Image (cartoon, rainbow, N blue to C red):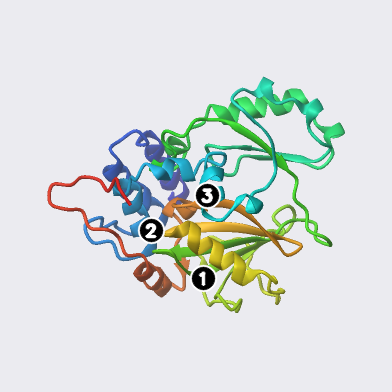
């Protein structure tokens, strides 16, 4: 009975994707967290992320969530040397010239999240299947695909081919994700072994494990892991990129000691995943100081 009710609720939620943002935020938040959303006085972190989606609309966010357009911002703020090499940007699947790409590469959708084709041997790629996949990606709109993530609403659908990154003696990359509030990194999230045994964990800025995790996480990092030699550098770079934003998560890779920018995320997990123990939802929420809407003001449109 519970499963049937949940399936019905999910179908209802999907049908509501085109409803007014304030209304949809209430449905989405309650469905995924089981809590009532208070947009007038949000307290918990994910409540504030919902507020962010509904009210915080500086135009620059459209640029910063675009995996190609953000490169200009990164180059301006911290320098081109922190960007991964790109081979091409494409608006249609048939523009991707596989024959001109190296034997290893990655193709990403610039306008959504988690749409990546990782190629470690070009000879094994079924180009027809890949083009069908790219066409499917280009037809998606992240705003309506998930929880009305405003920053993605008007991002132009494109594909980008990048250099395949690999760290010596590791089968997959480690992600270092810095949670920044008003330009100050408070802690980071680390992802290990995404390809075969995905684990994640939260660490303080001295790289000591923190006592919380996401409620729905599959596996946590339980073993001690080595602190990256350039942790302080990645923190510093994250804070430069995060300057003036109430909240943004800034992601980096460390490739044999070299920091490579990943992405900027304003709505982690779409504001759906609570932390556990529960008290950390408020503790982390306190880090995020939202700007005030002036009398008669409907949206925040400037930094």
Instruction: Decide: is 272 above or below 5.
Output: below
x, y (%) of residue 102? 81, 36
x, y (%) of residue 79? 59, 53
**Which residue is depicted at the point 40% across and 44% down?**
60
Q: Which mark is residue 241?
A: none
**Which residue is depicted at the point 78% across and 53% down?**
166
Q: Is residue 119 visible?
A: yes
Q: Is residue 126 visible?
A: no
**SS of the residue under disc 3:** helix
The residue where tag 1 is placed is 187
The residue where tag 3 is placed is 76
Instruction: Decide: is 127 above or below 47.
Output: above
Classify 10 Å Cα crowding around label 3: few (below 14), some (14-19), many (20 and above): few
**SS of the residue under disc 1:** strand
Q: Of the residues under marks 2 and 3, which one precedes in the sequence?
A: 3
Q: Residue furthest top?
A: 94
x, y (%) of residue 99? 81, 26
Foreground mark, 1 or 2?
A: 2
Q: Which mark is residue 244?
A: 2
**SS of the residue under disc 2:** loop
Q: Residue furthest left?
A: 295
């Amino acid at each position: 009975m519970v499963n049937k009710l949940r399936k019905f609720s999910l179908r209802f939620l999907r049908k509501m994707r085109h409803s007014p943002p304030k209304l949809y935020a209430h449905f989405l938040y309650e469905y995924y967290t089981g809590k009532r959303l208070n947009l007038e006085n949000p307290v918990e972190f994910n409540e504030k992320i919902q507020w962010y989606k509904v009210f915080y609309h500086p135009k620059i966010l459209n640029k910063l969530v675009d995996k190609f357009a953000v490169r200009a911002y990164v180059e301006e703020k911290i320098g081109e040397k922190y960007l991964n090499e790109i081979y091409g940007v494409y608006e249609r699947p048939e523009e991707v010239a596989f024959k001109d790409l190296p034997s290893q590469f990655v193709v990403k959708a610039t306008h959504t999240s988690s749409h990546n084709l990782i190629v470690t041997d070009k000879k094994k790629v079924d180009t027809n299947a890949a083009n069908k996949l790219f066409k499917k990606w280009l037809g998606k709109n992240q705003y309506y695909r998930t929880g009305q993530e405003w920053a993605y609403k008007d991002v132009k659908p494109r594909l980008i081919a990048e250099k395949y990154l690999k760290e010596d003696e590791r089968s997959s990359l480690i992600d270092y994700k810095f949670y920044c509030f008003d330009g100050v990194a408070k802690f980071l999230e680390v992802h290990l072994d995404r390809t075969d045994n995905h684990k994640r964990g939260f660490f303080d800025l001295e790289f000591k494990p923190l006592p919380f995790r996401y409620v729905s996480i599959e596996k946590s990092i339980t073993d001690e892991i080595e602190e990256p030699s350039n942790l302080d550098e990645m923190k510093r770079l994250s804070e430069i990129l995060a300057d003036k934003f109430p909240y943004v998560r800034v992601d980096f890779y460390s490739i044999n000691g070299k920091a490579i920018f990943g992405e900027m995320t304003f709505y982690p997990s779409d504001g759906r995943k609570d932390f556990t123990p529960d008290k950390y939802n408020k503790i982390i929420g306190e880090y995020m100081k939202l700007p005030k809407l002036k009398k008669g003001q409907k949206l925040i449109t400037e930094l």
